[in-house]
Image (cartoon, coloured by chain):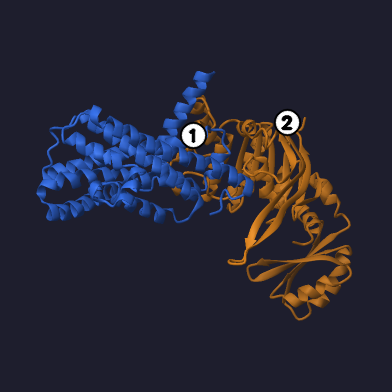
Chain colours: A blue, B orange
Amino acid sequence: MIMEKLKLNIKIFFEGAYLSYVGLFRWLSPSTYLATLIFSPLTQMLFFVLIGTYAQGTDKAYFYVIGNALMNAAMSGIYGVTMSIGGDRWDGTLPYLFGAPANRMTVFLGRAFMHILNGMIGVLTGLLWGWLLFHIDYSAANPWALLLTILVTTFSTSGLGLLMGCIGLITRNVMFVNNTVYFVLLVFSGANLDLATLPSWMRIVSNYLPLTRGIASARLIIAGHSLTEVLPLLIEEFGIGLFFALLGYSLFRWFEITAKKRGTLEVF
Amino acid sequence: MSAIEVINLQREFQTTIGVFNRKKKIVPAVKGISFEIAGGELFGLLGPNGAGKTTSVKMLTTLLIPTGGTAKILGLDIVNDAEAVRPRIGFIFGGERGLYWRLNATDNLRYFASLYYLDPAVSKKRIPYLLEMVGLTDRADEKVEGYSRGMRQRLHIARALLHDPEVLFLDEPTMGLDPVGARELRQTVRNLQDEKKTILLTTHYMFEADALCQRVAVINKGEIVAMDTPSKLKDSVNDLSVVEIEVFGIPPETVEKIKTLSMVENVSVEDRDQLQLLLVHTSKGAEAIPLLISELNGLKLGKVTTREPTLEDAYVRLVGGE
């Protein structure tokens, strides 16, 4: 009985992950997908890498390439996951979702799954652009350690995305909030600024954000450090992602219970 | 045991008025309704817009917590046993929303089947069966965004039946459908009745309730004002006749004047393209016609007829002409 229930929950997770991705992810047409997940990050990378290397020399190109490639995880994790959670409100499917007996945690986490894969593709594409355009050398990197870093980082940014998606259930202007969060990550995560040069209060903020340790870890791995050396960073990055995901889930449950009490399920 | 048992069910909403000097206002939407629905019965809940029909359905489908009273579905409390109620009920709300428009019909049903823990082997057979039942087999692989309103509404029915629930709540299922679509949907509801489903149908189309429901309750301003079989409700207006007069360009003050006549119980006006149909509820029958025509002196008139009252006329009397 327990095994059957577990099997069904796994089915709900994967079926929900795939179908909600197709059903709710509004970038899912070839042209928008390419523009948002490939060309937009490319222009961002060109902008920061060219400015950075102009200011600090071409030997620092790897710093900006890796930082901006990892920012793709945030693009997919925050914007994509928000669409998949908040989309139920826009499509009017929330009453049918909350009127169904499905396990809420399975439904909730399933919404992030495909975006984690998407984020990984985005990061790898970013690294590929770095190799093609700026001749970044990845030969010293342990590929599995790098993949693990990318996976953990996309997970952690998707955790933040799950929280943002729940905010999307209670506000109309979630994209404004998302843009702000994205730019906070751009500044505070160390993607384009050396954290050591930041004022102390900014370093404190960086410590509580996803992406910060993922970017640091990726730079270390590409520089030839081993997985063991970056493992503490990855564990912390995973922990931060989990914290935001659980916070998002709590908000999701709070939203469901409060909406049923107040009658605000379909009210913005 | 009744399939649905509702006892003094209430729901209030709190709203705020003003921007800076905000004041809370309590709005009662459902003011203590009670009724029972037997297993396999098709029960209609009729009422004008804002009467409390949808609020009642939302409470019974566990989507809204009542502020007073209780209700049981198949013996399970809608608040305390909500998780046990959900797999045993199906529901649809009128309108086009509530489906994933970017998915096709099959994928929509696949997704909702998983939300109801439907065994994959069962859903593999059940989805084609339901699509056939609602007449969407030929369009099953097309995205829902390309569907007509009627097709979406029929897909909603299929979605609600995925887990073969014992109790169904259909909230204004024919709202906004064209006559053909509405007729097809009513036939689908009749088929469900043949399968012995317990159905609570809300509508403000009287002929629909008359044609489908075994019993109806009329709800107005959050209260049930009558509950009986459609034929008995019609009997309650046996003392009335309805005079229908086709008239071109009737001014509102004339309608108000007719309302004040002692033999007139109720007056309504329906727009019919270039003319209006004046409906007068009166106890005098054909005898009232000369007086009514004299009140309409100077206006161009069409056909004048009298007829027996319908369920709609009973409804109009019950809700006070709203």
Coordinates of residue B206 in the picture (x, y in percent): 72, 52
Residue at mark 1: chain: A
Looking at the rendered structure, the secondary structure element under dot 1 is: helix
Indicate the quadrant containing the N terminus of chain A: top left, top right, bottom left or bottom right: top right
Coordinates of residue B290 in the picture (x, y in percent): 85, 73
Q: Is residue A22 visible from the viewing direction of this image?
A: no
Towards the viewer: A83 or B147? A83
Residue B192 figure quarter: top right
Q: Is residue B123 above or below residue B205?
A: above
Coordinates of residue B284 in the picture (x, y in percent): 89, 64
Residue B275 figure quarter: bottom right
Three-letter code, disc 2:
Gly
Towards the viewer: A121 or B266? A121
Viewer-side label of 2, 1: 1
Q: Is residue B302 above or below residue B189?
A: below
Towards the viewer: A219 or A76? A219
Tag of residue A105: 1
Q: Is residue A3 left or right of residue A78?
A: right
Question: What's the distance in space between the residues labelled 2 and 1, CA to CA?
Answer: 28 Å
Image point 20% across, 55% down: which residue? A47
Residue B3 figure quarter: top right
Picture mark count: 2
Tag of residue B75: 2
Three-letter code, disc 1:
Met
Q: Residues within 10 Å of mark 1 (few under 14, many from 20)?
A: some
